[in-house]
Amino acid sequence: MSSSRPDPVRPEPVTMAEGRGGASLASPEAVLEAGAVAAPAAAPAPVLAAAPPPRRAWAPLLQAAPLWLVLLLFFVFPLLATGVVSLWNYTEYSLVPDITRRNYVEMFEGCGNLSDGLCTTFRTYLSTLRLCGMVWAITLLLGFTVAYFLCFHIRSDGVRMALFLLCTAPFLTSNVIRMISWIPLLGREGVVNHALLAMRLVDQPQDWLLFSEFSVVLAFVHLYTLFVVVPVFNSMMRIDHRLLEAARDAGASAWQTIWHVVVPLAKPGLVIGSIFVIVLVMGDFVTIGVMGGQQIASVGKVIQVQMSYLQFPAAAAQAMVLLALVLVIIAVMTKLVDIRREL
Protein backbone atom coordinates (compact mmCIF):
# COMPACT_ATOMS: atom_id res chain seq x y z
CA MET A 1 0.00 0.00 0.00
CA SER A 2 1.50 3.12 -1.05
CA SER A 3 0.92 6.24 0.79
CA SER A 4 0.53 9.43 -1.04
CA ARG A 5 1.24 12.71 0.53
CA PRO A 6 -0.89 15.62 -0.45
CA ASP A 7 0.76 18.21 -2.48
CA PRO A 8 1.56 21.27 -0.52
CA VAL A 9 -0.91 23.92 -1.06
CA ARG A 10 0.66 26.75 -2.85
CA PRO A 11 -0.55 30.00 -1.48
CA GLU A 12 -2.50 31.97 -3.88
CA PRO A 13 -1.76 35.66 -4.27
CA VAL A 14 -3.76 37.50 -1.76
CA THR A 15 -5.55 40.46 -3.09
CA MET A 16 -6.79 42.95 -0.57
CA ALA A 17 -10.22 44.22 -0.97
CA GLU A 18 -10.73 47.75 -1.90
CA GLY A 19 -10.73 50.13 0.91
CA ARG A 20 -13.06 52.86 1.59
CA GLY A 21 -11.32 55.10 -0.86
CA GLY A 22 -11.63 52.60 -3.69
CA ALA A 23 -7.91 51.78 -3.96
CA SER A 24 -6.80 48.12 -3.99
CA LEU A 25 -3.52 46.68 -2.69
CA ALA A 26 -1.73 44.20 -4.98
CA SER A 27 -0.08 41.03 -3.76
CA PRO A 28 3.45 41.18 -2.43
CA GLU A 29 4.78 39.35 -5.50
CA ALA A 30 3.16 41.82 -7.83
CA VAL A 31 4.54 44.66 -5.87
CA LEU A 32 8.03 43.14 -5.98
CA GLU A 33 7.79 42.51 -9.71
CA ALA A 34 6.72 46.05 -10.34
CA GLY A 35 9.51 47.35 -8.16
CA ALA A 36 7.06 49.43 -6.35
CA VAL A 37 8.44 48.68 -2.89
CA ALA A 38 10.09 51.86 -1.64
CA ALA A 39 12.21 52.37 1.41
CA PRO A 40 10.26 53.46 4.44
CA ALA A 41 9.85 57.20 4.45
CA ALA A 42 12.03 59.03 6.91
CA ALA A 43 10.31 60.64 9.85
CA PRO A 44 9.67 64.34 9.28
CA ALA A 45 12.19 66.59 10.93
CA PRO A 46 10.82 68.31 14.01
CA VAL A 47 9.80 71.87 13.41
CA LEU A 48 11.81 74.10 15.71
CA ALA A 49 10.27 77.28 17.07
CA ALA A 50 11.74 80.41 15.65
CA ALA A 51 14.45 81.76 17.90
CA PRO A 52 13.55 85.10 19.47
CA PRO A 53 15.37 88.02 17.96
CA PRO A 54 18.46 89.03 19.88
CA ARG A 55 17.65 91.58 22.56
CA ARG A 56 19.35 94.85 21.99
CA ALA A 57 21.34 96.02 24.98
CA TRP A 58 20.35 99.63 24.44
CA ALA A 59 16.58 98.99 24.42
CA PRO A 60 16.08 99.39 28.21
CA LEU A 61 18.23 102.51 28.17
CA LEU A 62 16.08 103.93 25.39
CA GLN A 63 12.92 103.24 27.40
CA ALA A 64 14.36 105.02 30.44
CA ALA A 65 15.63 107.95 28.38
CA PRO A 66 12.63 110.27 29.11
CA LEU A 67 13.07 109.81 32.85
CA TRP A 68 16.81 110.39 32.61
CA LEU A 69 16.17 113.50 30.56
CA VAL A 70 13.80 114.90 33.17
CA LEU A 71 16.26 114.14 35.98
CA LEU A 72 19.11 115.76 34.08
CA LEU A 73 17.17 118.91 33.25
CA PHE A 74 15.45 119.48 36.57
CA PHE A 75 17.76 117.82 39.12
CA VAL A 76 21.33 117.21 38.00
CA PHE A 77 21.93 120.40 36.01
CA PRO A 78 20.48 122.73 38.70
CA LEU A 79 22.66 121.05 41.34
CA LEU A 80 25.74 121.37 39.16
CA ALA A 81 24.92 125.00 38.43
CA THR A 82 24.47 125.72 42.15
CA GLY A 83 27.80 124.07 42.93
CA VAL A 84 29.57 126.08 40.24
CA VAL A 85 28.01 129.40 41.31
CA SER A 86 28.99 128.70 44.93
CA LEU A 87 32.64 128.95 43.80
CA TRP A 88 32.18 132.29 42.05
CA ASN A 89 33.07 135.70 43.37
CA TYR A 90 30.65 138.61 43.46
CA THR A 91 30.48 142.31 43.94
CA GLU A 92 27.65 144.49 45.15
CA TYR A 93 26.00 144.54 41.74
CA SER A 94 27.39 141.65 39.67
CA LEU A 95 28.74 138.13 39.62
CA VAL A 96 32.39 137.47 38.86
CA PRO A 97 32.94 133.98 37.37
CA ASP A 98 36.25 133.38 39.13
CA ILE A 99 36.99 130.26 41.15
CA THR A 100 37.30 131.29 44.78
CA ARG A 101 36.77 129.87 48.24
CA ARG A 102 35.54 133.18 49.59
CA ASN A 103 31.93 132.09 50.11
CA TYR A 104 32.81 129.02 52.17
CA VAL A 105 35.52 130.86 54.12
CA GLU A 106 33.15 133.68 55.05
CA MET A 107 30.45 131.18 55.99
CA PHE A 108 32.64 129.43 58.58
CA GLU A 109 34.67 132.46 59.60
CA GLY A 110 35.37 132.36 63.34
CA CYS A 111 33.87 128.89 63.78
CA GLY A 112 37.23 127.36 64.65
CA ASN A 113 37.61 129.46 67.81
CA LEU A 114 35.16 127.94 70.28
CA SER A 115 36.43 130.03 73.20
CA ASP A 116 34.24 132.91 72.02
CA GLY A 117 31.22 130.67 71.66
CA LEU A 118 29.62 129.23 68.58
CA CYS A 119 29.83 131.21 65.38
CA THR A 120 26.75 132.55 63.61
CA THR A 121 26.67 129.69 61.11
CA PHE A 122 26.76 127.00 63.79
CA ARG A 123 24.08 128.76 65.85
CA THR A 124 21.88 129.04 62.76
CA TYR A 125 22.25 125.36 61.94
CA LEU A 126 21.60 124.36 65.55
CA SER A 127 18.43 126.47 65.57
CA THR A 128 17.29 124.82 62.35
CA LEU A 129 18.07 121.34 63.66
CA ARG A 130 16.22 122.05 66.92
CA LEU A 131 13.10 123.14 65.06
CA CYS A 132 13.40 120.17 62.73
CA GLY A 133 13.79 117.76 65.65
CA MET A 134 10.70 119.07 67.45
CA VAL A 135 8.57 118.99 64.31
CA TRP A 136 9.84 115.53 63.39
CA ALA A 137 9.05 114.07 66.82
CA ILE A 138 5.53 115.52 66.97
CA THR A 139 4.60 114.66 63.39
CA LEU A 140 5.96 111.12 63.81
CA LEU A 141 3.86 110.56 66.94
CA LEU A 142 0.70 112.05 65.45
CA GLY A 143 1.16 110.35 62.08
CA PHE A 144 1.73 106.95 63.68
CA THR A 145 -1.32 107.36 65.93
CA VAL A 146 -3.63 108.36 63.09
CA ALA A 147 -2.39 105.57 60.81
CA TYR A 148 -2.69 102.98 63.61
CA PHE A 149 -6.26 104.07 64.35
CA LEU A 150 -7.26 103.86 60.69
CA CYS A 151 -5.65 100.45 60.10
CA PHE A 152 -6.52 98.52 63.26
CA HIS A 153 -9.56 100.22 64.80
CA ILE A 154 -11.71 100.86 61.73
CA ARG A 155 -13.26 97.61 60.53
CA SER A 156 -15.05 98.86 57.43
CA ASP A 157 -12.88 99.42 54.39
CA GLY A 158 -15.24 102.08 53.10
CA VAL A 159 -15.16 104.06 56.35
CA ARG A 160 -11.39 103.66 56.54
CA MET A 161 -10.84 105.08 53.07
CA ALA A 162 -13.34 107.89 53.72
CA LEU A 163 -11.45 108.94 56.85
CA PHE A 164 -8.14 108.66 55.03
CA LEU A 165 -9.40 110.92 52.25
CA LEU A 166 -10.69 113.31 54.91
CA CYS A 167 -7.12 113.60 56.19
CA THR A 168 -6.05 114.80 52.74
CA ALA A 169 -8.74 117.52 52.62
CA PRO A 170 -6.34 120.28 53.80
CA PHE A 171 -4.36 119.78 50.60
CA LEU A 172 -7.25 121.33 48.71
CA THR A 173 -5.92 124.69 49.90
CA SER A 174 -2.40 126.07 49.64
CA ASN A 175 0.17 125.91 52.40
CA VAL A 176 0.28 129.69 52.69
CA ILE A 177 -3.47 129.95 53.36
CA ARG A 178 -3.38 127.17 55.95
CA MET A 179 -0.39 128.78 57.63
CA ILE A 180 -1.83 132.30 57.72
CA SER A 181 -5.11 130.97 59.13
CA TRP A 182 -3.34 130.49 62.48
CA ILE A 183 -2.64 134.22 62.89
CA PRO A 184 -6.24 135.23 63.78
CA LEU A 185 -6.36 132.34 66.23
CA LEU A 186 -3.07 132.91 68.06
CA GLY A 187 -2.81 136.73 68.04
CA ARG A 188 -3.25 138.95 71.10
CA GLU A 189 -6.85 139.55 70.10
CA GLY A 190 -7.28 136.08 68.70
CA VAL A 191 -9.73 133.33 69.56
CA VAL A 192 -7.29 131.41 71.76
CA ASN A 193 -6.40 134.39 73.94
CA HIS A 194 -10.06 135.35 74.33
CA ALA A 195 -10.88 131.79 75.36
CA LEU A 196 -8.05 131.72 77.91
CA LEU A 197 -9.17 135.04 79.38
CA ALA A 198 -12.80 133.94 79.47
CA MET A 199 -11.87 130.77 81.38
CA ARG A 200 -9.69 132.88 83.71
CA LEU A 201 -6.66 130.73 83.00
CA VAL A 202 -4.54 133.83 82.33
CA ASP A 203 -4.76 137.45 83.40
CA GLN A 204 -3.59 139.03 80.15
CA PRO A 205 -3.14 138.04 76.51
CA GLN A 206 -0.22 135.71 75.86
CA ASP A 207 2.36 136.98 73.39
CA TRP A 208 4.23 133.67 73.05
CA LEU A 209 1.37 132.10 71.13
CA LEU A 210 2.31 133.96 67.95
CA PHE A 211 5.61 135.00 66.35
CA SER A 212 7.56 132.46 68.38
CA GLU A 213 9.00 128.98 68.09
CA PHE A 214 5.68 127.62 69.35
CA SER A 215 3.75 129.09 66.43
CA VAL A 216 6.41 127.94 63.96
CA VAL A 217 6.32 124.36 65.25
CA LEU A 218 2.51 124.39 65.32
CA ALA A 219 2.33 125.54 61.70
CA PHE A 220 4.90 122.94 60.61
CA VAL A 221 2.99 120.15 62.36
CA HIS A 222 -0.23 121.29 60.71
CA LEU A 223 1.38 121.38 57.27
CA TYR A 224 3.49 118.22 57.29
CA THR A 225 1.79 115.62 59.50
CA LEU A 226 0.04 114.13 56.48
CA PHE A 227 3.45 113.39 54.93
CA VAL A 228 3.94 110.91 57.77
CA VAL A 229 0.41 109.53 57.83
CA VAL A 230 0.43 108.37 54.20
CA PRO A 231 3.60 106.19 54.15
CA VAL A 232 2.96 104.81 57.64
CA PHE A 233 -0.63 103.96 56.69
CA ASN A 234 0.66 102.20 53.56
CA SER A 235 3.10 100.11 55.63
CA MET A 236 0.55 99.21 58.28
CA MET A 237 -2.01 98.06 55.73
CA ARG A 238 0.42 95.27 54.78
CA ILE A 239 0.57 93.90 58.34
CA ASP A 240 -1.35 90.67 58.83
CA HIS A 241 -3.85 91.14 61.65
CA ARG A 242 -3.25 87.57 62.73
CA LEU A 243 0.17 88.66 64.00
CA LEU A 244 -1.50 91.00 66.46
CA GLU A 245 -3.89 88.25 67.54
CA ALA A 246 -0.95 85.89 68.04
CA ALA A 247 0.84 88.48 70.18
CA ARG A 248 -2.24 88.94 72.34
CA ASP A 249 -2.66 85.17 72.66
CA ALA A 250 0.97 84.99 73.81
CA GLY A 251 0.18 87.37 76.65
CA ALA A 252 1.59 90.61 75.20
CA SER A 253 -0.03 93.84 76.30
CA ALA A 254 -1.26 96.45 73.86
CA TRP A 255 1.91 98.53 74.21
CA GLN A 256 4.13 95.47 73.82
CA THR A 257 2.25 94.48 70.69
CA ILE A 258 2.70 97.95 69.23
CA TRP A 259 6.38 98.16 70.11
CA HIS A 260 7.44 94.62 69.16
CA VAL A 261 5.10 93.89 66.25
CA VAL A 262 3.65 97.03 64.67
CA VAL A 263 6.64 99.37 64.92
CA PRO A 264 9.20 96.96 63.37
CA LEU A 265 6.86 96.16 60.48
CA ALA A 266 6.03 99.85 59.94
CA LYS A 267 9.68 101.00 59.89
CA PRO A 268 9.80 101.67 56.13
CA GLY A 269 6.83 104.02 56.36
CA LEU A 270 8.28 105.74 59.43
CA VAL A 271 11.61 106.33 57.68
CA ILE A 272 10.01 107.61 54.48
CA GLY A 273 7.76 109.98 56.41
CA SER A 274 10.71 111.19 58.47
CA ILE A 275 12.70 111.94 55.32
CA PHE A 276 9.80 113.97 53.93
CA VAL A 277 9.46 116.05 57.09
CA ILE A 278 13.19 116.65 57.56
CA VAL A 279 13.75 117.72 53.95
CA LEU A 280 10.77 120.07 53.98
CA VAL A 281 11.53 121.69 57.34
CA MET A 282 15.27 122.13 56.80
CA GLY A 283 14.79 124.19 53.65
CA ASP A 284 11.64 126.10 54.62
CA PHE A 285 11.82 129.87 55.01
CA VAL A 286 8.26 131.06 54.33
CA THR A 287 6.67 129.44 57.39
CA ILE A 288 9.54 130.49 59.67
CA GLY A 289 9.42 134.04 58.34
CA VAL A 290 5.65 134.50 58.67
CA MET A 291 4.91 132.54 61.84
CA GLY A 292 8.18 133.52 63.52
CA GLY A 293 7.77 137.21 62.81
CA GLN A 294 11.17 137.34 61.06
CA GLN A 295 12.77 136.74 64.47
CA ILE A 296 13.86 133.09 64.25
CA ALA A 297 17.06 132.20 62.44
CA SER A 298 17.16 129.26 60.04
CA VAL A 299 19.33 128.21 57.14
CA GLY A 300 16.51 128.64 54.66
CA LYS A 301 15.91 132.16 55.93
CA VAL A 302 19.61 133.02 55.57
CA ILE A 303 19.59 131.80 51.96
CA GLN A 304 16.47 133.85 51.23
CA VAL A 305 18.00 137.01 52.69
CA GLN A 306 21.24 136.54 50.75
CA MET A 307 19.31 136.12 47.51
CA SER A 308 17.29 139.26 48.21
CA TYR A 309 20.61 141.14 48.43
CA LEU A 310 21.76 139.54 45.14
CA GLN A 311 24.50 137.57 46.92
CA PHE A 312 23.85 134.51 44.81
CA PRO A 313 27.27 132.84 45.27
CA ALA A 314 27.00 133.10 49.06
CA ALA A 315 23.46 131.73 48.93
CA ALA A 316 24.62 128.88 46.66
CA ALA A 317 27.36 127.99 49.14
CA GLN A 318 24.82 127.89 51.97
CA ALA A 319 22.58 125.71 49.84
CA MET A 320 25.39 123.24 49.11
CA VAL A 321 26.27 122.90 52.79
CA LEU A 322 22.60 122.46 53.69
CA LEU A 323 22.24 119.82 50.96
CA ALA A 324 25.26 117.94 52.29
CA LEU A 325 23.84 117.97 55.82
CA VAL A 326 20.44 116.72 54.68
CA LEU A 327 22.05 113.95 52.62
CA VAL A 328 24.06 112.84 55.66
CA ILE A 329 20.87 112.66 57.76
CA ILE A 330 19.07 110.67 55.05
CA ALA A 331 22.05 108.31 54.67
CA VAL A 332 22.06 107.60 58.41
CA MET A 333 18.32 106.90 58.43
CA THR A 334 18.48 104.61 55.41
CA LYS A 335 21.37 102.73 57.00
CA LEU A 336 19.23 102.01 60.06
CA VAL A 337 16.42 100.62 57.87
CA ASP A 338 16.97 99.19 54.39
CA ILE A 339 13.87 100.62 52.75
CA ARG A 340 14.25 98.65 49.50
CA ARG A 341 14.54 95.36 51.35
CA GLU A 342 11.65 96.08 53.71
CA LEU A 343 9.18 97.19 51.04
Image (spheres, rainbow, N blue to C red):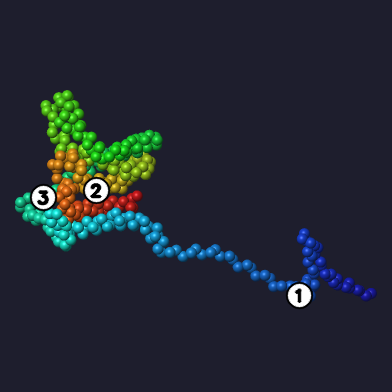
| Residue annotated with mark 3 | 120
Classify residue 181 as left or right of residue 42: left
Q: Can the viewer see residue 343?
A: yes
Along the line of sight, the residue nearer the viewer: 258 or 180: 180
Q: Nearer the viewer, mark 1 or mark 2?
A: 2
**Residue 249, percent from left and from top:** 35, 39
Mark 3 neighbour density, 10 Å: few (under 14) some (14–19) many (20 or more): some
Q: Nearer the viewer, mark 3 or mark 1?
A: 3
Specify the amino acid type for callout 1.
Gly
Distance CA(mark 2)–CA(mark 3):
22 Å
Q: Secondary structure at mark 1?
A: loop
Mark 1 neighbour density, 10 Å: few (under 14) some (14–19) many (20 or more): few
| Residue annotated with mark 2 | 279
Classify residue 7 as left or right of residue 180: right
Mark 2 neighbour density, 10 Å: few (under 14) some (14–19) many (20 or more): some
Q: Quadrant of the N terminus?
A: bottom right
Specify the amino acid type for callout 2.
Val
